[in-house]
Image (tube, helix red, strand yellow):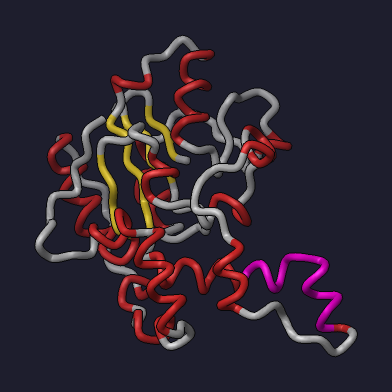
């Protein structure tokens, strides 16, 4: 999460860390410390990976009006995001690594998809949240009507440039190779039922990639 009180903006980074270059581009305007994660949040109410709902509560505790800020969320196409989430979990989760050590394969990707929750679970709320759970949340669950703009990670330089241009300044976002990765590489990992599952659960996310819906501004 990136915060500027002087310029009144908050950027909620994509839960899996897409577009890390945004922080460097916005650095001259950032004036609020944000801890790397909730376990290292001493001295600040804010931490990386905090959801917009949690941030609203934290801002209230700080005596600041969350609604006064331009609040931007970065998302990835869910077909790409879920394959990346699966691959990261395979590397990070002890049980999965143990399976491989004894010669077993990772859990089946398509079966794993069916077990995901695309919204917050009570037991995962609060500061126990981590990328392994929030990485699967849908756009509606992540933003929860708390953001003013949604930016697609694949087109972030242009879309962020337009938003900040409207605010009166122009960070040097530049161009980045990650924005040109082929979605086809990710789609090939899905079968027809799993594609349909994602299309159903993540319909609001996918709507942002429909050329017939170019307006990324949301009702706050």
Residue at horizontal 73 percent and vertical 37 percent from the top: 39
Residue at horizontal 36 percent and vertical 51 percent from the top: 74
The quadrant of the image that shows the C terminus is top left
Please give the range of residues in magenta. Answer: 87-100
Residue that lies at the very extreme toward the front in this rendered image: 193
Please indicate whether residue 149 sits to the left or right of residue 125 in the image.
left
Residue at horizontal 55 percent and vertical 50 percent from the top: 134
Residue that lies at the very extreme toward the top in this rendered image: 63
Please say if 131 is above or below 169.
Answer: below
Decide whether residue 95 is among the magenta residues.
yes
Please say if 23 is above or below 43.
Answer: below
Residue at horizontal 42 percent and vertical 52 percent from the top: 138
Q: Nearer the viewer, residue 18 or 56?
A: 56
Please say if 23 is above or below 122.
Answer: below
Residue that lies at the very extreme toward the right in this rendered image: 102
Q: Quadrant of residue 210?
A: bottom left
**Residue 131 spot, x, y in % from top left:** 60, 53
Please indicate whether residue 35 sits to the left or right of residue 73 in the image.
right
Residue that lies at the very extreme toward the left in this rendered image: 212
Q: Quadrant of residue 9?
A: top left
**Residue 146 spot, x, y in % from top left:** 35, 32
Dominant SS type (magenta) = helix
**Residue 18 spot, x, y in % from top left:** 45, 61
In the rendered image, is residue 24 in sight? no
Q: Nearer the viewer, residue 197 or 142?
A: 197
**Residue 57 spot, x, y in % from top left:** 50, 21
Q: Nearer the viewer, residue 74 or 188?
A: 188
Q: Quadrant of residue 105?
A: bottom right
In the rendered image, is residue 100 in sight? yes
Decide whether residue 33 is among the magenta residues.
no
């Amino acid at each position: 999460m990136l915060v500027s009180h002087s310029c009144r903006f908050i950027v909620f980074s994509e839960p899996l860390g897409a577009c890390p270059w945004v922080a460097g581009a916005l650095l001259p305007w950032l004036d609020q410390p944000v801890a790397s994660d909730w376990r290292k949040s001493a001295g600040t109410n804010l931490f990386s990976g905090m959801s917009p709902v949690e941030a609203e509560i934290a801002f209230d505790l700080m005596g600041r009006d969350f609604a006064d800020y331009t609040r931007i969320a970065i998302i990835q196409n869910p077909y790409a995001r879920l394959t990346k989430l699966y691959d990261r979990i395979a590397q990070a989760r002890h049980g999965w690594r143990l399976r491989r050590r004894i010669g077993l394969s990772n859990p089946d990707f398509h079966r794993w998809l069916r077990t995901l929750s695309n919204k917050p679970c009570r037991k995962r709320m609060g500061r126990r949240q981590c990328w392994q759970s929030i990485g699967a949340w849908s756009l509606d669950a992540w933003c929860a009507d708390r953001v003013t703009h949604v930016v697609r990670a694949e087109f972030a330089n242009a879309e962020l440039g337009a938003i900040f241009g409207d605010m009166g300044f122009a960070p040097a976002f530049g161009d980045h190779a990650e924005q040109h990765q082929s979605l086809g590489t990710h789609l090939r990992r899905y079968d027809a039922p799993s594609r349909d599952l994602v299309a159903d659960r993540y319909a609001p996310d996918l709507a942002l990639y429909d050329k017939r819906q170019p307006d990324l501004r949301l009702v706050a």
